[in-house]
Amino acid sequence: MTAGTEGIDPTMASSAGYDTGAHSTDGSPKASNQAHVAAMVRAAILELMKYGLLEEASKPNLYRNALLHRDEVDQVLGWLELALRIDDIRGLAFIVVADAPDRDDDEWSHPLVRRQRLTLEQSLLVAILRQQFVAHEVEAGVGAGDARVALDDLIPHLQAYLGDLGSDAQERKRLLTLLEQLKGHGIVSEVDQQDRVTIRPIIAHLANPENLTNLVQALREATNDGEIGPTSVEEADE
């Protein structure tokens, strides 16, 4: 899941048990250290609230600060009914909606999280990318970066389920359109000069086995009905 917001009230950080630095005027080492810690925590939280995740590969300092001060970050997020999840093997920190035993999830959605239903084509590509990501981790090890895949390797997978459009240009256009849509969910990078995309590690948490099972069922139903529409697979976007 990802979440987005314009900012966060600095008073929340100060009431979490440490000084934000806004009122530290005595210049003591303790006050200076508190201000430094508060600044690191605040920067990590703002980045998390803006993008929903932190990747060690791209934001190593903010990622390290989130881990070092996880309790403080979790406390602030907890007031917003959010929580921090850490995948230290893949170098990933991301926001989820906090568990609440007295809440009916079918009738509740977090105000900072917007759910979007993926089309079957989008969900199918997520499943294909997840398969490629798993294969990369099997070969290179869990947490290995640079899970890249060539566009030419993805097109045959789409054709197997969605049919042949009869034109290489149309096939490529369909794939690029889907990739551009998934990029907004933080799943893939831009297409590079070698016509490859990097699969981002958050896919390991978005495309779980339950969602992929739902996708297979939706695909079968769509094949029988001759229609391709939204699936039951949902992702949270910023």
Image: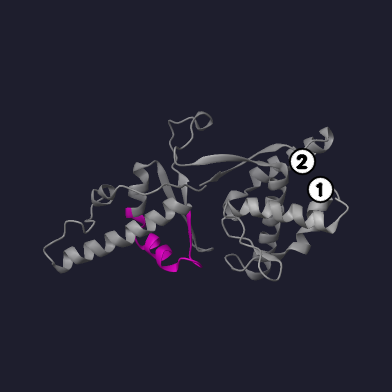
State the residue position of label 1. Answer: 161
State the residue position of label 2. Answer: 219
Identify the mark at residue 88; answer none if there is no mark: none
95 on left or right of 41: right
Q: CA distance from mark 2 to mark 1?
A: 8 Å
Residue 210 falls in image quadrant: top right
* Label 1, residues with CA under 10 Å away: few <14, some 14-19, many ≥20: few
Residue reaching furthest left?
26
Whole-percent x and y of residue 158? 78, 52
Whole-percent x and y of residue 182? 63, 52
Contact (CB < 8 A) between labels 2 and 1?
yes
For the residue pair 184 and 222, the one nearer the viewer reads as 184
Membership of 61 in magenta stretch: yes
4 on left or right of 33: right
Whole-percent x and y of residue 149? 70, 65
For the residue pair 82 and 185, the one nearer the viewer reads as 185
In the image, what residue occupies the spot 28% across and 47% down? 12
Amino acid at circle 1: Tyr
Colouring scheme applied when the structure was drawn: one colour
16 on left or right of 55: left
Amino acid at circle 2: Leu
* Label 2, residues with CA under 10 Å away: few <14, some 14-19, many ≥20: many
Magenta-highlighted residues: 53-72
For the residue pair 157 and 178, the one nearer the viewer reads as 178
